[in-house]
Image (tube, helix red, strand yellow):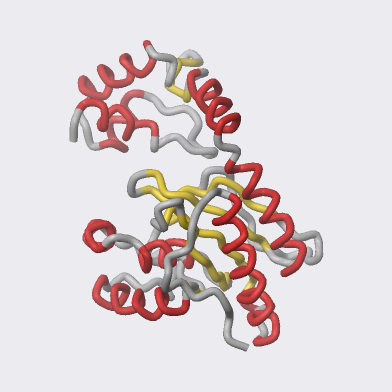
Amino acid sequence: MGTVSKALSLLSFFNRSRSAIGLSDMARLSGLNKATVHRLLSELQAEGFVEQVGAGREYRLGPAFLRLASLREATVPVRDLATQVLTDLSNETGETSHVSLLHGTTLSSVAYAYSPRHGTRVTMEDADVLTYHNTSSGLAVLAFAAPDFVDTILAGPLEARTPETETDPALIRGLLPAIHDEGMAESVGGFEADVHSHAVPLFDAGQQVIGAIAVAAPTARMTAEHQSLIQRTLRHHAIRLTRLMGGFLPDDFRRETAA
């Protein structure tokens, strides 16, 4: 891993519940020695990507991200497009919906929507990082990803988040052809107990998978009739969002859900 990659990898440890990180903790999280971490953070700080705060001089994300985020939204308003589609999807299904996009080998949530129809619902967090082996979004991406990408993901540690999580790479790989043929992935309790989710991949202008759009519901609410509604509605809005983002579906992509 080069110097730039190492520096950027440190940024991935910040999240909503861990917004500030001290030098020692960053060294522990990254597995790098403190001297290297200090040098990398100093370089990031000089460019405004991190800043130090508080008596403990902990690091947090810096103002440079505000400028870059604004520029990104102004030139490619993906979040706006996604939110528009997700609002319709959640209103029509009565369930939580979300869009996640690929950034290298990371699959991150970029937008989500809730339905006011039920008091009990699946909740999301901004910029959630989704794992591949135990989420419908991750499986949908893997089913349409390049073989070397799949190899890289399945060669890494596969955490068993729940008793239902599948962690055998061979078994996970065996699921992908059927998901590809169906154009939709499904996960029941693999990432979070009592959550049943479906996801459809999203594609760019080169027909390459770039992420997924998903609907997640409590398993207790997933009747056969409700599942049919979700699958039909999700596929429609997935195709719609791919097109809104300027993407094109692969020639062999399934465009309709069986009755």
How many circles with numbers are drawn on the protein?
0
Question: The N terminus is located in which quarter?
Answer: top left
Q: Give coordinates of residue 62: x percent, y percent.
A: 48, 20
Q: Compared with residue 247, is residue 37 higher up or lower down, i.e. above or below?
A: above
To which quarter of the image does residue 217 belong?
A: bottom right
The residue lying at 30 percent from left, 79 percent from top is: 174
The residue lying at 48 percent from left, 67 percent from top is: 136
Q: Give coordinates of residue 52: x percent, y percent.
A: 45, 15
Instruction: Between residue 42 and residue 239, name the one nearer to us.
Output: 239
Question: The C terminus is located in which quarter?
Answer: bottom right
Q: Is residue 104 left or right of residue 39?
A: right
To which quarter of the image does residue 250 belong?
A: bottom left
Q: Is residue 3 left or right of residue 64?
A: left
The residue lying at 19 percent from left, 30 percent from top is: 2
Whether residue 236 is visible: yes
- Check the image and name the residue furthest to the front: 251
Whether residue 56 is visible: no
- Check the image and name the residue furthest to the top: 46
Q: Compared with residue 257, is residue 191 higher up or lower down, i.e. above or below?
A: above
Q: Give coordinates of residue 156: x percent, y percent.
A: 25, 57
Q: Compared with residue 56, is residue 176 higher up or lower down, i.e. above or below?
A: below
Q: Compared with residue 224, is residue 60 higher up or lower down, i.e. above or below?
A: above
Q: Give coordinates of residue 42: x percent, y percent.
A: 32, 14
